[in-house]
Image (tube, rainbow, N blue to C red):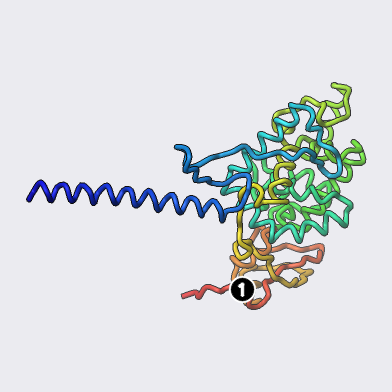
Amino acid sequence: MKELKFRTEFVFFFSGIAAGIFILLIIGFYGSKTRGTSQVQNIFNAGSNNFNKIISPKIPDKIDFAGEKVPLENFEVRERIDREMLVNVYWYSSTILGLKRANRWFPIIEPILKKNNIPDDFKYLAVIESNLTNTTSYAGAVGFWQLTEDVAKKYGLEVDDKVDERYNVEKSTEAACKYLLDAYSEFNSWTLAAAAFNMGKSGLEKQIERQRVHNYYNLLLSEETLRYVARIISMKLIFSDPEEYGYEIKKDDLYPPLKTHNVEIDSSVENWTDFAFSHGINYKILKYYNPWLRDISLTNKKKKVYEIKIPDEGSYESIKDE
């Protein structure tokens, strides 16, 4: 009886394993049918020992940046772009966050670029600089466009201990446009203008004179600047067709645009917390919508007009303060 029981349990054990394998095969087969034909995806390959296949993202035969041809026939340029495609396609968390944020911020950035006659491709420059967040670099560059204090002030932004307009998306985008227009006027190339945004106009001009070439792809620059345009191009390719590169993000998962209205002030503000309460919000919400306010108060001796963003009623969920 013990021997018969052992044999019975043995048969049931391996029957269960066989059934489990069969179910996995069925799930894998139908799962691969429903996931489409994107380049980068998990593939259940019943004919091999590989359950997951990671592939190299395909680079299109023709690419342009801001209307300027990317010379893919040059192997070094192609491999440079290939590197950035691999990094950004497989850097899942960062790329997904960028795609979600773009739904909120591109509608603000795009019209400003258009108004200033800046090619639309430059919105991806903001993606590689900050991933569309108001971040601060180790070198002190700030905001979506990572502007230094000197550059910001040169192009009309207010930067002090009370106000730092590098954190204002609209105004910092305007300043970035002015920089790019100046760079394009000097170098007569949008690709070189992008490189100048990274390394500075004077530094780029020095390298052009030293190497006696006037094409970005012929210049030997620092690794960061050599990778810079390729990074922008990689984001353009991924963001223009995310599903092609394996990103399937539902519309409901995208970050919605912020619904706000502006309140103008032309005087000092003794306490922004009191100001926030007077408009039905708290200090945290006020700073979230106006990150360029850098202190609890505002000294406005020159009576400058500021526009304060206030969220529309019902556009956010208030947290009950106990």
Note whether residue 19 is visible. Answer: yes
Residue 105 placement (x, y as % from top left) = 71, 58
Residue 149 placement (x, y as % from top left) = 74, 45
Q: Residue at x 73, y 51 (%)?
A: 240
Q: Quadrant of residue 64?
A: top right
Q: Secondary structure at mark 1?
A: loop
Q: Which residue is mark 1?
A: 281
Q: In the picture shown, does residue 174 fall above or below 146?
A: below
Q: Residue at x 40, y 53 (%)?
A: 23
Question: Hey, which residue is sitting farthest left in the picture?
Answer: 1
Q: In the picture shown, does residue 300 fall above or below 261?
A: above
Instruction: Indicate the amino acid at tag 1.
Output: Ile
Q: In the picture shown, does residue 126 fall above or below 78?
A: below
Query: Is residue 1 rendered to the left or right of residue 41?
Result: left
Q: Residue at x 74, y 40 (%)?
A: 60
Foreground of the two, 157 or 189: 189
Note whether residue 142 is visible. Answer: no
Foreground of the two, 217 or 127: 217
Q: Quadrant of residue 229?
A: top right
Residue 131 placement (x, y as % from top left) = 66, 49
Query: Is residue 271 rendered to the left or right of residue 153?
Result: left
Foreground of the two, 151 or 260: 260
Residue 109 placement (x, y as % from top left) = 77, 57
